[in-house]
Amino acid sequence: MPRELADLPFADHLRPFDGVLEPEANVDTVHLDGLDFDDVPAAGSRFTEAALSSVTFSGGRLRRSRFSDVWMDTVRWMGTDLVESSWLDVELNGGALAGLQLFDARLRRVAFSHCKLDAVNLRAAALHEVTFTDCVLRDVDFGGATLTSVSFPGSSLEGVRLGKSRLAKVDLRGAKRLDIAEGYDALRGATVSSLQLMELAPALAQSLGITVTDR
């Protein structure tokens, strides 16, 4: 279950954020609340034991930024450059992520809950122990990505791209909807339910060059 702000082990140490986001900024043990960041130039920033609530990032450049032990609640990311960023022990609750550039990013022990991901670019990213719980993933691109121990309980996958991705211990059984736009052959290493397999069968056969006919 998503944690509340008061549940965080570092909650008592948080102080209000009163600085600026700039390149190589060190955002450590602070609470960013109700803030809007437009086109912020903060590449290489480090967020450590930080909390973000009702924060909006519109555009901006946070390329190669690092997020470690970060809690985000109802945070909106719109068209932000997060290329080659790293995420470790991060929680995103009720957030909206649209048009993000996250290719070559590294996500480890990251939990998305009740989030909407729209046209997020995760090409060549590495996801390890990542969960998408009750989320909507629309037009998300995992092309060439590595997914290990990733699950999607209660989530809807709509037009997701998996071309040339590598999957290991990926559990798709809990997904409410499984609509793959590209990369059926990349499902090696994934676990699906028998019902999902029946729904995927025509597209799987087509991707393998199998002709199915009763005539």
Image (tube, rainbow, N blue to C red):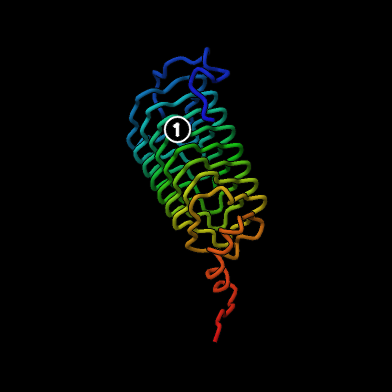
- Place of residue 184 in the rendered image (x, y in percent of width and height, measured from the top left): 56, 64
Q: Is residue 102 left or right of residue 148?
A: left
On screen, 102 above or below 47?
A: below
Front in this rendered view, residue 17 or 202: 202
On screen, 51 above or below 210?
A: above
Front in this rendered view, residue 175 or 44: 175
- Place of residue 58 in the rendered image (x, y in percent of width and height, measured from the top left): 34, 38
- Place of residue 43 in the rendered image (x, y in percent of width and height, measured from the top left): 46, 37
Task: Rate crowding at label 1 as few (under 14), some (14 to 19) or many (20 or more) other CA atoms within 10 Å.
Answer: some
What amino acid does circle 1 point to?
Pro
Front in this rendered view, residue 198 or 184: 198
Front in this rendered view, residue 71 or 196: 196
On screen, 74 above or below 64?
A: above
Q: Is residue 27 left or right of residue 151?
A: left
Please give the name of the residue rendered at 57% of the width and 59% of the height, measured from the top-left corner: 195
Q: Quadrant of residue 34?
A: top left
Q: Is residue 138 left or right of residue 149?
A: left
* Residue, disc 1: 23
Q: Considering the image in quadrants, where does the C terminus appear? A: bottom right
Query: Circle 1 — which element?
Result: loop
- Place of residue 134 in the rendered image (x, y in percent of width and height, measured from the top left): 48, 41
On screen, 215 above or below 109?
A: below
Q: Considering the image in quadrants, where does the N terminus appear? A: top right
Please give the name of the residue rendered at 42% of the width and 16% of the height, measured from the top-left corner: 16
Please give the name of the residue rendered at 47% of the width and 19% of the height, measured from the top-left corner: 30
